[in-house]
Amino acid sequence: EPEVTQTPSHQVTQMGQEVILRCVPISNHLYFYWYRQILGQKVEFLVSFYNNEISEKSEIFDDQFSVERPDGSNFTLKIRSTKLEDSAMYFCASSSTNNEQFFGPGTRLTVL
Amino acid sequence: GIQVEQSPPDLILQEGANSTLRCNFSDSVNNLQWFHQNPWGQLINLFYIPSGTKQNGRLSATTVATERYSLLYISSSQTTDSGVYFCAVNTGANSKLTFGKGITLSVRP
């Protein structure tokens, strides 16, 4: 069964460093998303992406964040200068035209 | 934006018991999904159920869209059912999902 994959599973970085989180969505899906979950809290939407552009973003998704689909398979989230409060689990998701979103296993980001 | 409330916040069951988890939402929805977050943090799709009733093994779900709620039923619970159950909705096709705070289920042997 096709699934969303994410790498790395765990990333540790120093405050102020740039990180890139990678995702491979399900191959025939057209809509891509990033969400995050701070430990013990609910899952929050960051950004959605369709047809090579951002379709929606939350207030969390400020100028420190960017997304890219560099080729036909990868979807990346970049955080330019990480802060302590960026520590969270980051989930990538994708959907086709039927609207059901499928989530990857997540990348746990720890900012020291 | 749309509000999603889940209840109860915590639930402790003995193995073999049945349970009902509730999700209320504040507006009409285009999509409603139930997820199980396992101890490793993975979000597992349980149901895509904007309306009606579906069953998958010991789990079933019902969404009454006109009354703005959904129920997840777990029968004959097992210890592997433990984890956090999230309800999530959106109000437009392929738009962002808004999650509830989740229900933490602990099934004791």
Image (cartoon, rainbow, N blue to C red):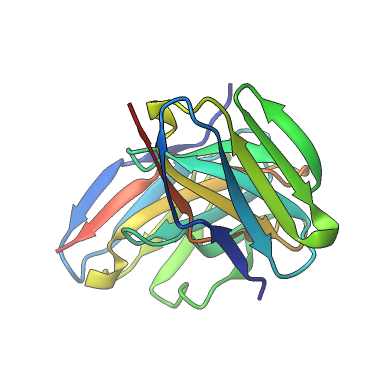
Q: Is residue B59 left or right of residue B29?
A: left
Q: Nearer the viewer, residue B57 or B18?
A: B18
Residue A63 appears in which quarter of the rendering? bottom left
Q: Position of residue A9 (x, y in %)?
A: 30, 41
Residue B19 appears in which quarter of the rendering? top right
Query: Compared to B72, does B64 lie above or below?
Result: below
Q: Position of residue B67 (x, y in %)?
A: 81, 61
Q: Is residue B18 left or right of residue A98?
A: left
Q: Position of residue A3 (x, y in %)?
A: 54, 30
Q: Is residue B90 left or right of residue B39?
A: right
Q: Nearer the viewer, residue A100 or A40?
A: A40
- Residue lying at 49% horizontally and 40% vertically, measured from the top left: B36
Q: Nearer the viewer, residue A91 or B106?
A: B106
- Residue lying at 19% horizontally and 53% vertically, measured from the top left: A12
Q: Position of residue A101 (x, y in %)?
A: 63, 45
Q: Is residue B20 left or right of residue A75?
A: right
Residue A39 appears in which quarter of the rendering? bottom left
- Residue lying at 22% horizontally and 57% vertically, measured from the top left: A110
Mark count: 0
Which residue is at the far right? B66
Q: Quadrant of the N terminus of chain A?
A: top right
Q: Quadrant of the C terminus of chain A?
A: bottom left
Regarding residue B54, the answer to whether it shows in the image is yes
Regarding residue A83, the answer to whether it shows in the image is no
- Residue lying at 59% horizontally and 52% vertically, measured from the top left: B87
